Every structure is written in structure tokens, then in C-alpha cells.
Image (cartoon, helix red, strand yellow):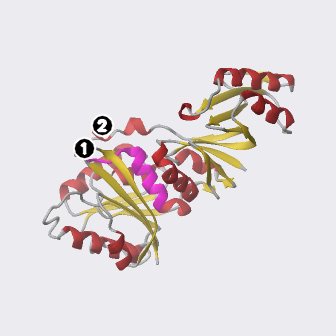
């Protein structure tokens, strides 16, 4: 058994748990604010997650006080030796506990059991998380590669206003293609500046994009070339999302950010016809899809042959909520 430290706000927890379950964990269950348990994990998948800080092998669950955490550790059996560091968190300051006291007390238990303390480069890290009335104690096994800030949309060689944040783009890729990663082919039929494709490529997927505007296809090509290694497998072409130049079942997943607003014509299509056509094409080429939009397209997705496994409304700013549709070919 493992436990996960979820990232984001309280409103992101269901979203974070599903991303983890799709891409790196099994039987994820929220147990307290910012914390969830998982029956199993894919260790190499945890670093690629967006909304999970890290995963730990669960030693025990108890009440959210230092004495109870000490009792759990004293009663635990484990086959480990070497140096250790204790890291304690009070998740969102929801527990009445001192993390410094917890680290000191638990560190003393480990020293008594033969460990040496090394706060800089330990062989093992004991993670202790307090949230409301719950405490989870575990040995850290993997943590997120938190480099999203280094890929801010405004820092890209090609930038357009409204570009999606890398952390969100990574989460949507994981939701769409998680079960097939890292050996997945991911298609974005409205790729824009290529943010979703960059994140797909960074998790090892074959990233394939189309855009109806030549400027966008060219810009996405520039961005992918900038962020992905020379041996990465990616392709961008100009194309219509309602008539993709790919064979049936050519991809493992489709993920796209539909146009926002009430534009009357987009690339020669009414917005409703564009999204409906893109959903039909997505169902033709892949068994899984994530559609991000400024409104619900659930009815159109079902008409196009998709089952809606989950839908999230996520606040971007005061005037924009993103509707995230997690779709499975019906």
C-alpha cells in the first residue's frame, strides 16, 4: 500500500486522484485533505504526474498528533539501513501539530534503531503528513519532477495569449493517455502553440499535432523543437480537425483544447460543427480522449460515440472555467 500527496487546491483533489490513477497508480482513494492511498503504483510514472507531489510506501495511518505517529513508527518492521531524513508536512495547515516536533521525535526513533541522520543526501526519507485528524507515515519512493515553471507559455519561442499552463497540459495528457504511457501515440488535432504536445513528448509519447492555421502549425513546430530532445518522436502538420489525415486506430489518445468564445466561424466551420466533427474524428482514430473547453460538450461527445467517464469544471480566472471531459470510446 502507498500514499500520495496531492498537489493543487482542495477543489483539484478529485481531478488529481484521477490523473494519478490513470497514469501511475491503482485503486486511488482520498483519505484526508491533500492525501490519498493507492493499492499500487508505477514508480516511473509518479515523476511525470502534474497534480501529485510524491508517493510513499505506507508504514501506517493514525491520528494527527506526534505521539501517535511515534507509536506507529516504533511498532513498524522494516528492512532498511543507512542514513535517513524525516520530512513532515501539515497539509494546508489543517492539523493542530508541530512538524518540527514530529521530525525531531520520529528522527529520534530512527536513530535508536540504528539510522544516522543526513538531511542533505539521505539513503531514505520518511514522509509524515498530517491533515485534519489523519496522519500518514511512509517511506518516500518517488516524487514529481516539478519543472513546469521553466516552461512558462510566455517563455516559449512562439507564444500566443491564452496558452495553457504546462502543469495543466501535463495533467490532461496523463488523463487521456495514461494507461498507454510512455509508449503511446498522442494526437492534438487543434494543437495551437503545441503546449499539449510538448508535455506529451516530455513523458515519452509520440506527439502528433495538426492545426488549421499555418502560423500555428509552424509555431508549434518551433516550440516542440525547442523543448524536446533530438531523439523525441513528434510531427506537426497543417490540417482540419474534422478530417484528420490518419488511419483508424492510429493513436492511443486524443487530447485537445477547443476554441473558446462565441466565434461565428473558425477555420470555415461553425464552432459547434468544428467540435462535433473533431470528436467524431477522435473516436475514429483513438479509444481515449480528453476535451478541454469553456463549456460542456458532453452531449456532442456522446453523439460522436464517446462515453463520458468524468467531467471537471476548473477555474482559470474570474471570467473563465475550463470544462474537462474525460472520454472513452463507447
Residue under the point 19% across and 60% down: 213
Q: Which residue corresponds to mark 2?
A: 155
Closer to the camera, 87 or 48? 87
Q: Taken as a whole, is the magenta stretch helix, strand or loop?
A: helix
The question of residue 173 being in magenta is answered with: yes
Residue 100 vs 249, above or below: the answer is: above
Residue 79 percent coordinates (x, y)? 85, 38
Of residues 97 and 105, the one drawn nearer to the viewer in this rendering? 97
Q: From the image, tell me which residue sits under label 1.
A: 159
In which quarter of the view is residue 69 placed? top right
Q: Is residue 119 visible?
A: yes
Asked if one can make out residue 304 in the rendered structure from this viewpoint, the answer is no
Badge number at residue 147:
none
Query: Can you give x and y, in whole percent of width and height, for residue 268 in the image?
Result: 14, 69
Q: Residues within 10 Å of mark 1 (few under 14, many from 20)?
A: some
Q: Residue 199: horizontal and vertical position, in percent?
A: 42, 50
User: Is 185 within the magenta?
Assistant: no
Q: Residue at x 84, y 32 (%)?
A: 74
For the residue labelled by badge 1, is the local secondary structure a helix, a strand or a loop?
loop
Residues tagged 1 and 2 counted as in contact (Cβ below 8 A): yes
Q: CA distance from mark 1 to mark 2?
A: 8 Å
Left or right of residue 70, residue 175 in this image: left
Residue shown at 44%/56% (left/top)?
A: 173
Q: Quadrant of residue 132?
A: top right
- Please, what secondary structure does the residue beneath circle 2 have? helix
Residue 130 is situated, as x and y percent measured from the top left of the image, at: 64, 34
Residue bounds of the magenta highlight: 160-176
Q: Quadrant of residue 129?
A: top right
Image: 72 above or below 292? above
Q: Is 86 situated left or right of 235 in this image? A: right
Amino acid at each position: 500500500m502507498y500514499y500520495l500527496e496531492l498537489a493543487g487546491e482542495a477543489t483539484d483533489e478529485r481531478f488529481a486522484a484521477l490523473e494519478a490513477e490513470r497514469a501511475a497508480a491503482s485503486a486511488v482513494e482520498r483519505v484526508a485533505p491533500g492525501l490519498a492511498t493507492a493499492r499500487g503504483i508505477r514508480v516511473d510514472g509518479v515523476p511525470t504526474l502534474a497534480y501529485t507531489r510524491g508517493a510513499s510506501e505506507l508504514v501506517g495511518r493514525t491520528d494527527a498528533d506526534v505521539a501517535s505517529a511515534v507509536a506507529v513508527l516504533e511498532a513498524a518492521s522494516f528492512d532498511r539501513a543507512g542514513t535517513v531524513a524525516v520530512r513532515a508536512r501539515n497539509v494546508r495547515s489543517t492539523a493542530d501539530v508541530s512538524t518540527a516536533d514530529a521530525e525531531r521525535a520520529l528522527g529520534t526513533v530512527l536513530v535508536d534503531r540504528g539510522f544516522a541522520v543526513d538531511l542533505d543526501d539521505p539513503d531514505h526519507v520518511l514522509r509524515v503528513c498530517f491533515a485534519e485528524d489523519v496522519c500518514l507515515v511512509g517511506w518516500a519512493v518517488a516524487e514529481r519532477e516539478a519543472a513546469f515553471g521553466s516552461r512558462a507559455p510566455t517563455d516559449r519561442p512562439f507564444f500566443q495569449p491564452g496558452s495553457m499552463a504546462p502543469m495543466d497540459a501535463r495533467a490532461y495528457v496523463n488523463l487521456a493517455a495514461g494507461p498507454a504511457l510512455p509508449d503511446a501515440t498522442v494526437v492534438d488535432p487543434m494543437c495551437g502553440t503545441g503546449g499539449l504536445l510538448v508535455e506529451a513528448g516530455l513523458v515519452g509519447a509520440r506527439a502528433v499535432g495538426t492545426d488549421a492555421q499555418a502560423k500555428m502549425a509552424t509555431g508549434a513546430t518551433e516550440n516542440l523543437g525547442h523543448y524536446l530532445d533530438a531523439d523525441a518522436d513528434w510531427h506537426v502538420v497543417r490540417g482540419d480537425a474534422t478530417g484528420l489525415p490518419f488511419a483508424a486506430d492510429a493513436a492511443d489518445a486524443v487530447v485537445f483544447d477547443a476554441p473558446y468564445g462565441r466565434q461565428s466561424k473558425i477555420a470555415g466551420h461553425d464552432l459547434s460543427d468544428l467540435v462535433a466533427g473533431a470528436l467524431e474524428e477522435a473516436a475514429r482514430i483513438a479509444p481515449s480522449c480528453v476535451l478541454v473547453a469553456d463549456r460542456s460538450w458532453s452531449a456532442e461527445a456522446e453523439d460522436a460515440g464517446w462515453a463520458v467517464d468524468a467531467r471537471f469544471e476548473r477555474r482559470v480566472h474570474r471570467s473563465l472555467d475550463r470544462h474537462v471531459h474525460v472520454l472513452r470510446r463507447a
